[in-house]
Amino acid sequence: MKNCAESGSLTELAAGFSARDIETMLGSWEFQAREDQWPPACAQSGLPWTVWLVMGGRGAGKTRTGAEWVRGVALGLPGYSHAPVGRIALVGETAADVRDVMIEGVSGILAIHARDERPLWEPSRRRLAWPNGAMAQAFSAEDPESLRGPQFECAWLDELAKWRHAEATFDMLQFGLRLGKHPRQVVTTTPRPAPLLKRLLADPKVAVSRAATSANAAHLAGDFLQRIVTRYAGTRLGRQELDGEMVDERADALWTRDMLEQCRRDQAPPLRRIVVAIDPPASSHARADACGIIAAGIDAAGHVHVLEDASLAAARPARWARVAVALYHRHEADDMVAEVNQGGEMVAAVIGEADAKVPVRQVRATRGKYLRAAPVAQLYEQGRVHHIGAFPALEDEMCAFGPAGLDNGRSPDRLDALVWAITALALAIQPGEPKVRRV
């Protein structure tokens, strides 16, 4: 835009075009496509990619991306292929999905072609034939053996994470991608923790593009995002279906995603006691552990309600102390629980500097993190702990925490603070007379 302005103006630039020409240009994919919808130049390794993995939320434009890629390679368009590709495979979850979404859908292959370049769809033969001789054949992931025999230069695989026979179908396709100088394939999918998808993400030769549903807001119904985001933001379903995140859990974790979804509530009942728990870091270095800060309360029935996760990345003691004190006052907590294994008297001292009136109960860990967390996880299994809203970062730690700690080897600081808060509320004797208040 800057160069256009320097040479004159956009008005002068457009002067040579008719209104119809301008409308056509603005409606073209070259003007509409986002950066994540364009084929990457190369994979992360610097080598030409063989797999382009397009992950995104629902309505993020994945189908349009796949359809435009097929159009681009079939017609030999710049940025897609140096010459038209003669043989293309279209693979969907079912035969109906290939037909209704990939080919005949609103953003499917037929819809995005101009009339004079549109391929002929032959349902009985399950194939598309372009005027230039290019051909695309439709396959269902329900029948991996149907891919035994045919050969291709390119392929579009849609919603791979949902395929029932993902491994077998993908493997059969790889044997068939043997034509041309550089066979390649595009995978468009909403992420799920499927083994095949995990392997593709871990492969440095796979080019990856990501997009959330919100990136395509201009092409969605006006109230869709507001309505859906209000209901699902931060939940496992929302992170997967809206944000396009891979939401995973480990088999030996103390918590599961299903367990956390079942414990979610919109608001807390009257609470008789509230605490703020802190798991302070050993240092404030940039690579130091985070400071876990969790507010939780217990009701008259003995159910614990997790109210807020105010944890911080590596921060100086004065900062996390101010955040913890602010959380204490915001929820009108009864006291503060702080682990002192790392800092000893320093923890109580920095909190006192932030607000000397805040009571601090110092606790010391005498058992390992897993042993301390196990009784808390049991309360979740019994339905006695509830999350008021969603806490994505905390819940990621919970579902990645097993006997050997977190998968990434980091300290589970948010989880530690959660364990201290719930232990203080439901698994230990409480001092003083509790108050009753609404949250």
Image (spheres, rainbow, N blue to C red):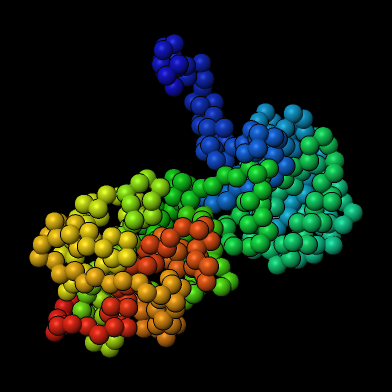
Side of 435 where 7 appears, left or right: right
* Whole-percent x, y for residue 310 in the image: 29, 60
Tell me the residue at 48%/50% (across/down). Answer: 212
* Whole-percent x, y for residue 286 in the image: 37, 45
Q: Quadrant of residue 167?
A: bottom right
Q: Quadrant of residue 146?
A: bottom right
* Whole-percent x, y for residue 329 in the image: 15, 64
The residue most toward the left is: 357
Of residues 56 and 122, the one nearer the viewer is 56
Let me know if residue 160 appears in the view. Answer: no
Number of numbered discs overlaid on the protein picture? 0
Of residues 332 and 52, the one nearer the viewer is 332
Tell me the residue at 54%/29% (across/down). Answer: 25
> Which quadrant does the C terminus fall into?
bottom left
The residue most toward the right is: 149
The residue most toward the bottom is: 301
Let me know if residue 150 appears in the view. Answer: yes
Of residues 248 and 426, the one nearer the viewer is 426
Tell me the residue at 51%/54% (across/down). Answer: 244
| Residue 163 to residue 435: above or below | above
Tell me the residue at 37%/67% (across/down). Answer: 416
Side of 242 where 125 appears, left or right: right
